[in-house]
Image (tube, coloured by chain):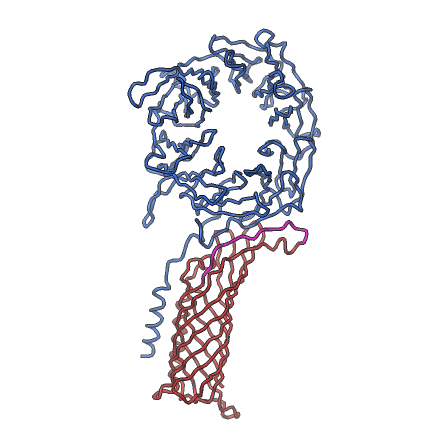
């Protein structure tokens, strides 16, 4: 399923290349949505999914910070993403883990003289990950809750394409569609996840409970990022 | 060109990313019945072969997880040492999975010492240990399917738990068989035999038993038949008493009206692996289907007291003189409890009672002069209720008796000195009750109730405590410092227990931990 989605994304991005016109450099802002799989190097992820990769979705906004007429264009970006996993753990718990990522990134794009609509780029990113999970027992007991923060940094490279302005008719001369496909690797922290039951926090008269150490979770691994957006 | 580049990029990323999914997260989360030992409660997950030890001696429970051998089948507390023993049957192996021998894992429960794994070789399913916890024997209890193409049910492995695993530890042996397989293994306390104190392992099989000298594991075992070779009866030895000063074993067997007396006599060893003692067997009538026996008298006048529910008398057997003295009883008995009336140093007496439901009376027997006074030394006390179980507190002069459910309650306290019984109203049967290690309190947990009950055995005052969920079991735990804890186990997929202060149980002092079977589920297990 994940591979199918990956190849479909690549195909869609590739096809979009054929439809674009020459890019105009006067569109420093960009906003978009992204999808793509996040593979995991560590088997600890398998506790929360039977798939080897987590589907991810996200939003981002960015701006070019160097003069756009140059050969090399520097851009910065802020974004949020969500990766999810779900499975039956040890035939006893319905395990769900949502990982939110907040990132800041910098990219260096190359404006090809012979095809200005096509821009290869390199990108570095970093930020925070927030793991938010729960384990619901299949039969007896209370749900266990997980939440933890860690860091992530990544690097990757890709291609972006940009269309010609398409809203000139209403006076917005800088609006263009853009699409990109990027592959890279993300390093993350491996926090020790702690599971707490909501039993005592929901009932002040309940007997206090001791949290349980589930072990280390790492979501580091290669990623593929496909995005579409608007440059303006 | 563009497509080719994208595909090449994707494939190069997929290649390292497509590792095999870890299937351990799909294994069932089932455990062996937990055991309490050295301030901890130990659960063993069977599918993932992990021992989860919840230490309850501190202010908050702490969890330690240790991998054990594949297919764990038994967990017991090690005697006289702060360890748990986990017996694993090992793995047959499959395509891509290497076979693994059976093993015995000694898991230290205090400090940070690493677990020791003794490869016992075969897929044994039972473990027994000496009272001092030095030796363990793994063996095969009768079973319908060993899960192997071939196995020898008379093979045993002797493990010296005080020594690390080595080429000579464990020692594997095959006990001589007359067609049967071991039913049980019992150990003697240190016995003086031929001038040397030694611990014997006694392997009980149908119609015979085998003696192994644990101080000399290289010596050949001694097998003693309890029936004639032409006798097809499986009389099945079930109880062994050791006269450590007289170097004598007394054996009671199901389906036999006799008791067997094995006197260990000094002899000259024949060869390097020969024994320096041999048993001389004597067989004495003990009434109809003897059910319990006890040693009475000192070393100069040692006798065996035997009760048989099929007889209207008890038997006092002098094995040296080959005499049997019947002592008439008003009520048949199945159990014997020896005690000193009025406390240590008082006259020796025996309480004879039946848990078979055949009578509602118990017998008090004064042992002083019993040979001559016989029935005059016996007093029968009518309880008006059947006895289903008894928990002796002879050092405190009482026995807690369990009874069938009635308006008089299911428990009573039998005062051994006054010879009176006082009822205690209880919703639960005595069979589910648990003592503290030092017998300061008795704990009960009615099924599906949110409460645990207790009786302070110093004041005999009962109490109960409401917990946050139904209780399935209650385990008293004492740590190395003597601090008493009580662990109530609740039903929960990932394990849930509540720790109570055994000396002063209260909700305020209680602490729970839930989901502890998932500890280190993501990795980092020892």
Q: Residue B36, position in %: x, y?
A: 53, 38
Residue B423: quarter of image: top right
Check the image and report above or below for B211 versus B513: above
Q: Residue furthest toward the left?
A: B271
Residue B357: quarter of image: top right
Question: What residue is rendered at 45% in x and 43% in y?
Answer: B113
Question: Is-magenta flag for residue A210?
Answer: yes
Q: Residue B494, position in %: x, y?
A: 53, 49
Q: Residue B60, position in %: x, y?
A: 58, 48
For the N terminus of chain A, the quadrant is: bottom left
Q: Nearer the viewer, residue B82 or B430?
A: B82
Question: Is-magenta flag for residue B280?
Answer: no
- The colour of chain B is blue
- Residue B145 visible: no
Q: Which residues are magenta?
A: A204-218
Q: Nearer the viewer, residue A184 or A75?
A: A75
Question: What residue is rendered at 52% in x and 18% in y?
Answer: B293
Q: Residue furthest toward the top?
A: B372
Check the image and report above or below for B371 versus A192: above
Left or right of B204, for residue B2: left
Q: Residue B428, position in %: x, y?
A: 64, 34
- Residue B187 visible: yes
Q: Nearer the viewer, residue B112 or B249?
A: B112
Question: What residue is rendered at 45% in x and 73% in y?
Answer: A125
Rendered red, the chain in question is A
């Amino acid at each position: 399923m994940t591979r199918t989605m990956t190849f479909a994304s690549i195909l869609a991005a590739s096809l979009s290349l054929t439809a674009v016109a020459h890019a105009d450099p006067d569109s420093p802002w960009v906003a978009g949505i992204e999808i793509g799989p996040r593979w995991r190097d560590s088997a600890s992820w398998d506790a929360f999914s039977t798939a080897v990769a987590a589907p991810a979705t996200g939003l981002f906004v960015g701006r070019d910070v160097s003069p756009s007429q140059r050969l090399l264009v520097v851009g910065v970006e802020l974004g949020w993403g969500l990766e999810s996993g779900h499975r039956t753990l040890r035939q006893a718990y319905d395990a769900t883990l949502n990982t939110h990522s907040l990132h800041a990134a910098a990219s260096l794009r190359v404006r090809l003289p012979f095809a200005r609509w096509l821009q290869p780029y390199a990108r570095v990113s970093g930020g925070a990950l927030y793991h938010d999970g729960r384990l619901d027992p299949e039969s007896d007991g209370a749900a266990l809750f997980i939440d933890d923060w860690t860091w992530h940094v990544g690097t990757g490279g890709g291609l972006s394409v940009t269309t010609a302005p398409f809203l000139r008719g209403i006076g917005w001369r800088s609006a263009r569609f853009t699409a990109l496909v990027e592959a890279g690797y993300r390093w993350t922290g491996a926090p020790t996840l702690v599971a707490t039951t909501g039993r005592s926090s929901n009932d002040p008269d309940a007997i206090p409970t001791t949290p349980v150490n589930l072990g280390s979770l790492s979501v580091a691994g290669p990623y593929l990022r496909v995005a579409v957006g608007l440059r303006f | 060109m563009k497509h080719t580049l994208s595909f090449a990029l994707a494939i190069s990323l997929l290649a390292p990313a497509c590792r095999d999914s870890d299937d351990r997260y799909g294994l069932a989360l089932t455990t062996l019945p937990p055991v309490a030992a050295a301030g901890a409660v130990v659960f063993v997950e069977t599918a993932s072969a992990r021992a989860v030890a919840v230490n309850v001696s501190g202010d908050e429970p702490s969890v330690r997880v240790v991998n054990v051998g594949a297919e764990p089948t038994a967990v017991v507390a090690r005697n006289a040492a702060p360890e748990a023993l986990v017996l694993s049957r090992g793995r047959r192996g499959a395509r891509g999975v290497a076979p693994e021998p059976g093993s015995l894992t000694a898991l230290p429960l205090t400090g940070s010492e690493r677990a020791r794994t003794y490869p016992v070789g075969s897929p044994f399913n039972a473990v027994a240990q000496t009272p001092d916890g030095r030796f363990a024997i793994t063996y095969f209890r009768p079973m319908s399917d060993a899960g192997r193409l071939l196995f020898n049910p008379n093979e045993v492995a002797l493990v010296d738990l005080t020594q690390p695993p080595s080429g000579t530890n464990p020692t594997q042996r095959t006990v001589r068989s007359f067609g049967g397989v071991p039913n049980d293994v019992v150990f003697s306390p240190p016995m003086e035999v031929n001038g040397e104190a030694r611990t014997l392992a006694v392997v009980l099989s149908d119609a015979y038993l085998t003696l192994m000298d644990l101080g000399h594991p290289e010596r050949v075992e001694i097998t003693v038949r309890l029936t004639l070779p032409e006798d097809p009866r499986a009389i099945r030895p079930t109880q062994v008493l050791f006269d450590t000063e007289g170097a004598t074993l007394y054996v009671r067997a199901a389906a036999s009206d006799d008791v067997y007396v094995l006197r260990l006599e000094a002899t000259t060893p024949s060869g390097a692996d020969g024994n320096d003692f041999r048993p001389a067997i004597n067989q004495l009538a003990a009434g109809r289907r003897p059910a319990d026996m006890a040693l009475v008298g000192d070393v100069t006048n040692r006798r065996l007291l035997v009760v048989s529910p099929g007889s209207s008398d008890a038997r006092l057997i002098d094995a040296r003189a080959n005499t049997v003295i019947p002592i008439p009883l008003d009520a048949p008995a199945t159990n014997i409890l020896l005690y000193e009336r009025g406390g240590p140093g008082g006259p020796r007496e025996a309480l004879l009672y039946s848990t078979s439901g055949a009578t509602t009376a118990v017998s008090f027997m004064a042992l002083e002069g019993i040979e001559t006074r016989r029935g005059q030394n016996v007093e029968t006390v009518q309880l008006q209720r059947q006895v289903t179980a008894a928990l002796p507190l002879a050092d405190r002069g009482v026995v807690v008796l369990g009874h069938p459910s009635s308006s008089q309650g299911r428990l009573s306290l039998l005062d051994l000195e006054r010879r009176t019984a006082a009822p205690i109203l209880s919703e639960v049967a005595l069979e589910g009750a648990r003592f503290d290690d030092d017998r300061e309190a008795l704990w009960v947990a009615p099924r599906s109730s949110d409460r645990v009950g207790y009786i302070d055995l110093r004041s005999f005052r009962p109490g109960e405590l409401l917990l946050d969920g139904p209780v399935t079991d209650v385990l008293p735990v004492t740590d190395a410092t003597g601090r008493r804890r009580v662990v109530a186990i609740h039903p929960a997929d990932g394990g849930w227990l509540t720790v109570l202060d055994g000396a002063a149980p209260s909700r305020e002092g209680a602490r729970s931990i839930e989901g502890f079977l998932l500890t280190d589920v993501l990795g980092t297990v020892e």
